[in-house]
Image (cartoon, coloured by chain):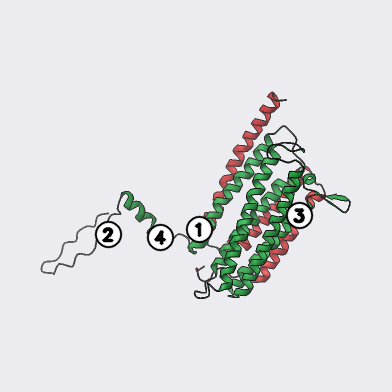
Chain colours: A green, B red
Amino acid sequence: MSAIPIPLPHGAPAPAPTPVPLAPPGGLRGFIADWSSDREAFHISWGKAMMWIFLLSDTFIFGSFLTGYMTVRASTTVGWPNASQVFSLHVGGADVPLLLIAIMTFVLITSSGTMAMAVNCAYRRDRVNAAALMFVTAAFGETFVAMQAFEWSKLILEGVRPWENPFGAAQFGSTFFMITGFHGLHVTCGVIYLCVVAYKVMRGDYEKTGNYQIVEIAGLYWHFVDLVWVFIFAFFYLW
Amino acid sequence: MSAQTGQQHPIGLYLKVWLLLFVLSAMSYMVDYLQFQGMLRWTLIVVFMLLKAGLIVAVFMHMAWERMAFVYAILLPPLALLVLVWLMWSEADYTFLTRLSFFR
């Protein structure tokens, strides 16, 4: 862009040279300038935007896992194990199908509910209740992981391995351990994350600024873990 | 929504959504418990799954109240996964037919 020079009237004092906007620098300097020029597309805090972008990338990881699961299940000529029977529990003299998985689902949903209430308390600056509800959420999460460990042990004792199992197609074991293992890892990380944030909330680290958005951001991660379970429950256990 | 105020919603709304999620989970469990099969089973599973996912994202993760530019930036990209699913579905179908012809 070139400014058209306006001819000055005779006798008028020459104005002080106004700073002309420089052409943006090129090369590495330009690269840095473009990425650091403080332009803002989303009117939300950077912390929340970054958490959402991380969750978006995680969506692609779990999406690819579930797509891989679909591919091996649709392409095997050996019968797929009946999840309803494989994950049944023997209670009171009868096999109840998918019982443990149903309980795990309810535990995770309950933890999502307590997390949502923790966010509500945090924004009302009720930090004791917010921290307490976060610890309750973490406890539910830990319960979930414990039940998953039980489920893994049970299946391993029955001879399920990533390369073979006594119920049918070998791919059942590999996809089961990969998908639920990766989800369990997310829950475990979430429990640690929630405990750290809850501890900081309880200690009053955010009292000075009064900004409790960190609880909402931690909550986003936790709800995402629940969200992923909704898809795993539907596609792996029910399908 | 400024960075300082954040998402503040009544606790009653959260409790209602929580209850709905419980009911929907119970219903998807009943699909297995009552041994529905075939198209009915798959339809019910997907419907309950999408309802639960929608409630979690919209209310618990506050997407219903975020600005439109942000909502679309996050929710549209995962649709690319549908292309992957379509590609892998046709690939799996091909592999299955190949295995049927050569490995049985």
What residue type is disc 1 on?
Answer: Met
Badge nearest the viewer, 2 or 3: 3
Q: Classify residue A216 by image quadrant.
A: bottom right
What residue type is disc 2 on?
Answer: Pro
Q: What element carries label 2?
A: loop
Residue annotated with mark 1: A50
Q: Residue at x 15, y 64 (%)?
A: A8
Q: Distance between the residues labelled 1 and 4?
A: 15 Å
Q: Where is residue A192 in the image (x, y as percent from the top left)?
A: 60, 60
Q: How far apart are marks 4 and 3 (CA)?
A: 46 Å
Badge nearest the viewer, 1 or 2: 1
Residue annotated with mark 3: A102
Q: Is residue A192 above or below residue A122?
A: above
What residue type is disc 3 on?
Answer: Ala
Residue annotated with mark 2: A21
Q: Where is residue A74 in the image (x, y as percent from the top left)?
A: 68, 36
Q: Residue furthest top?
A: B102
Density class for disc 4 (Cα within 10 Å; few <14, some 14-19, many ≥20) is: few
Taking A83 as reference, is A191 left or right? left
Taking A2 as reference, is A196 left or right? right
- Quadrant, the N terminus of chain A: bottom left
Q: Distance between the residues labelled 1 and 2?
A: 32 Å
Q: Nearer the viewer, residue B86 or A182?
A: A182
- Quadrant, the C terminus of chain A: top right
